[in-house]
Structures are given as structure tokens and as C-alpha cells.
Image: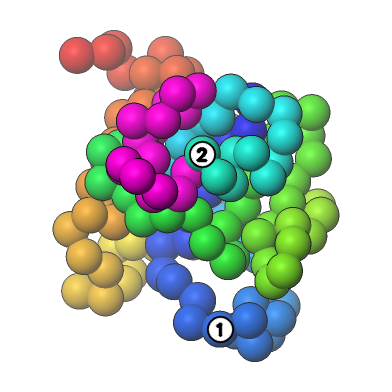
């Protein structure tokens, strides 16, 4: 399994990615879980090719409306290895991961500080992630 996290605010260039001194997990949102151990395959599975990637086989989309995976997004493998998608490849990174619910709450608080800088689709990603995380950790009951 590979967990795919999209940046809440997009990076516009490789230079912006390189200038990012430290990855702040509250600026990322879990968007998919891909049933594979192959990072490049999970990248392909979370990109629009012929159809919306949320409907691809082996992909569990946390929400329905998503952009394709791109530079600056994070891939977290079940074995604990984590990769940042950077040009031209996947860069191994070391991060300390909180629980899904703690991370989703932090992303929600970060989203609140951005106000009108994000569109409704991004807000929906975080809300769907909060609901999913709450269900996974037994805090919320599935509807």
C-alpha cells in the first residue's frame, strides 16, 4: 500500500520545491491509497489519463474531485519509506508521521488560515479526509 498526499497549495516550479527548507505535513492532504508497493506505479495510478484516476483499479480515493499527482506531492509506503515527487524522480525523505486523524486536523487548521486562497474542491478533500480518518480510528461511525 502506498498513501498519496497532495500539497494543498501547488508549487509552480522546481525552484520553489528546492527552496522549501522543510516539509510541513499540515500543508498536505491524503487523497488516495494505492494497492501497490511500486512508487512509480502509484504515481501513474493517480494521474488522469483516459478517465478520472479516482476510478482506477487498485486505487481507493479519499474524495472524488482531485487533480493529478504532481511535483511536490508525497508518497508514503507501508514499509515506512517516504518519497517526495521532484523533478525528475522520487526523492527519499524522512518524516515523522502522526496518526491520520491528527494530521487531518492539522491540515484542516492550516486550511482555515488560508481563507479564500483555496477553492471548494481542496476544502472538500480535507473534509473527506477528516471523515475517513475519524472512521479509520474509530472516532466516527461510517454513515
Instruction: Indicate whether 32 appears above or below 87.
Output: above
Q: Alpha carbon of mark 1 to alpha carbon of mark 2: how far?
A: 23 Å
Quick check: is 56 in the magenta stretch? yes
Residue 65, can we see it? yes
- Please indicate whether residue 96 sits to the left or right of residue 55 in the image: right
Q: Quadrant of the C terminus?
A: top left
Instruction: Indicate whether 123 appears above or below 118.
Output: above
Q: Quadrant of the N terminus?
A: top right
In percent of the image, x 60 and y 39: which residue is there?
42
In percent of the image, x 58 and y 23: which residue is there?
35
Circle 1: element type: loop
Percent across and percent down for residue 130 are 35, 36
Tally the marks: 2
Identify the residue position indicated by label 2 in the image. 45
Instruction: Indicate whether 93 appears above or below 36.
Output: below
Percent across and percent down for residue 57 are 45, 23
Q: Nearer the viewer, residue 70 or 52?
A: 52
Percent across and percent down for residue 127 are 27, 42
In percent of the image, x 64 and y 39: which residue is there?
41
Instruction: Indicate whether 68 appears above or below 9.
Output: above
Magenta-colored span: 46-61
Assess disc 1: are there few (<14), some (14-19) or many (≥20) residues with their C-alpha within 10 Å of its C-alpha: few
Name the chief secondary structure element in magenta: loop
Circle 2: element type: helix
Identify the residue position indicated by label 1 in the image. 13
Among numbered discs 1 and 2, the one appearing first in the sequence = 1
Assess disc 2: are there few (<14), some (14-19) or many (≥20) residues with their C-alpha within 10 Å of its C-alpha: many
- Please indicate whether residue 84 sits to the left or right of residue 30 in the image: right
- Please indicate whether residue 80 sits to the left or right of residue 87 in the image: right
Amino acid at each position: 500500500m502506498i498513501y498519496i498526499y497532495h500539497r494543498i497549495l501547488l508549487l509552480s516550479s522546481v525552484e520553489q520545491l528546492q527552496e522549501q527548507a522543510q516539509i510541513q505535513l499540515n500543508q498536505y492532504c491524503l487523497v488516495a491509497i494505492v494497492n501497490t508497493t511500486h512508487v512509480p506505479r502509484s504515481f501513474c495510478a493517480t494521474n488522469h489519463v483516459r478517465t478520472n484516476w479516482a476510478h482506477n483499479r487498485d486505487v481507493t480515493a479519499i474524495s472524488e474531485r482531485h487533480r493529478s499527482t504532481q511535483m511536490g506531492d508525497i508518497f508514503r509506503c507501508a514499509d515506512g519509506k517516504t518519497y517526495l515527487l521532484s523533478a525528475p524522480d522520487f526523492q527519499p525523505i524522512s518524516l515523522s508521521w502522526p496518526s491520520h486523524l491528527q494530521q487531518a486536523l492539522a491540515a484542516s487548521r492550516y486550511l482555515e488560515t488560508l481563507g479564500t486562497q483555496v477553492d471548494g474542491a481542496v476544502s472538500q478533500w480535507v473534509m473527506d479526509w477528516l471523515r475517513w480518518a475519524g472512521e479509520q480510528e474509530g472516532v466516527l461511525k461510517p454513515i
